[in-house]
Each structure stands twice: as C-alpha cells, then as structure tokens.
Image (spheres, helix red, strand yellow):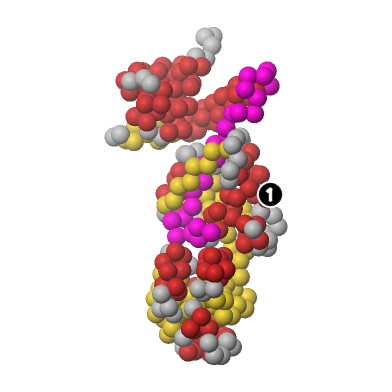
Amino acid sequence: MASLNYNHLRYFWAVAREGNLTRAAEKLHVSQSALSIQIRKLEERLGHPLFERTGKQLRLTEAGHIVLEHAEVIFSAGGELLSILGNRPGTRRQVLRVGALATLSRNFQIAFLRPLLGREDVEIVLRSGTMAELLRALESHRLDAVLSNMPPMRDAGTRWIAHPIAEQPVSLIGTAVRARGEHELHALLSREPLILPTLESSIRVGFDALVDRLGIAVRIAAEVDDMAMMRLLARQDIGLAVVPPIVVRDELANGSLRELAQLPELSETFVAVTLSRRFPNPIVRHLLDAFSPVDADPVDATD
C-alpha cells in the first residue's frame, strides 16, 4: 500500500484553511492549476472527493472535514516537534479564528479576547457577520468559535455547543440631562422616550414582559438591531437606551452617559458557540475557562 504524500496533504490543508484556491496558491507560491492537480492526486489516493466545487467556491465534503482534522493534528505535531528539538523554541504562533455577530457589543468582544491580546505566540483573526454566515464558517472549520447574545437553534442533527460565558444586567442609560429629576423606574419608563433593541432580541422579549407586568405604555423613540447604533443614539440624547452597561462602558466612565436605573430580572446572556470536534483548538478552552463562572462581570475582566 503506497504511503500518503504529505506535500499533497499540506496543499489541501492550506486550501481548506483559506477557503479559497487563489489565496492558498499565493501563500504557497504555486499556480492555481498546480495546486488543483496536487489536491486531485490526494483525492485519488484517498478515494474520496475532499471539496465540493460550486463555481469558484470550495466547500469541504464530509471526508474533507475528516482529513482536515487529521491534517491539523499532523502539522501541529510537526511544529511542536521542531520546538521540542530546539529549533526556535516558543516562537510558533497559534491562530485563533473567532466570529462575532455584527451587532454584538465591541466592548464585550474585547473583554472576551483580552487574555490573549498582546501575546506574541497567538494570532487572532476576528470576523463579523450574520449568525447564518458565522455558523456556516464554524461548520466548515474556518472559525473556532462564534460569539453571540443569541444561542442558535439546534437539533439532533447539529453539533453546535453554546457555552454561556457571561451574563450582564440591563439598565436604562441616558445623558446627564435626562438624569435630572426622578430616577424611579416606573416614572422613567412612563416619561422618557426609549431606544430599544428590535423584537428579535432576547432583551426586548424580557423588556416587553416587564412593562406589561408594570402596566406601562412606553414611548419608543427608536428600535435598533445594532448595539453601536444604540450607543450613538443615547449619546445624541434621543432617549434612554435599554442596554447592558458594558455596551457604554467608556461613556459611563467619562460621564457622558449615566446609568439611571437597572431593569429588574432582565439580563443579557453572552455565549460562545463551538463545534463538537475531535481536535478542538485548545486556545478556545483557555478563553472559556477564563470567563468562568457565568455570572462574572466582563467589565471587571477588562480592568
């Protein structure tokens, strides 16, 4: 039985990690046609197609995912071997690819990644997008984890694992002008225009239930699906924003915004979504452990 050609495997590994034949060819300094030939030889050797080719797009097949998992281990072990034998010990950089909802608080993303920021042995690749886009990237092993404030729906056919990593209280946030006068929750909700998350948000679901229990008819100034925009509207004094304080941490610190009242029994849970893998990226576990327990305050984690 002929042995596996590891050059072919490395070419496949490069294309699978890049998700694009052109970029992989440029990094390997070979032509696209030569790269395609090497991958085809590997597929012939293994007896299975490794990519589904749809126009210019390449998607890993089930066999491709299995080969990628083994290739990750093989080449990671090779790097460790060089380090152990004294060839530039400790200089091999690990790569962590994290996706985040485009609407997710930037402050929270930084808080989550802070244990790795500035480390010379770790390279962080951070991408944003919709939940559907990010989950597809996670399934194709182009991401190691996805940060979200909305756990994705799953069933027996999905391999996603949603790790709760932080829980933030939700407050009414406004300018110093709106902070004058009565700070009692019922009065604030009845009097002030509000900047609310959209109906799809878990915060909005809890908020609507809260005002229904209190019997309050609120005045909505804006419904926004982006935390950065809610932050901006609050700074522009459009109304009181219903957000976790971490979203406006800097404004609270410099006094341009103030926390007027905390909304009882209302919180936002942040999760890190991973894929059940035989060979997970160990850096992800390090970050998940750094954010335990669930009710730890991410603001404190950034100080």
Compared with 33, 137 (above or below) is: below
Task: Quickly name the residue at label 1.
Answer: 289
The reply to whether the magenta stretch includes residue 96 is: yes
Q: Residue at x 55, y 53 (%)?
A: 110
The reply to whether the magenta stretch includes residue 298 is: no
Q: Can residue 101 be seen?
A: yes
Q: Residue at x 65, y 25 (%)?
A: 89
In the image, the segment drawn in magenta is 84-107
Compared with 266, 113 (above or below) is: above
Compared with 195, 65 (above or below) is: above
- The location of residue 53, given as percent across then percent down, is 34, 32
Q: Quadrant of the N terminus?
A: top right
| Secondary element at image label 1 | helix
Residue at the outermost left position: 55
The front one of 139 and 11 is 11
Compared with 31, 51 (above or below) is: below
Mark 1 Cα-neighbour bin, 10 Å: few <14, some 14–19, many ≥20: few
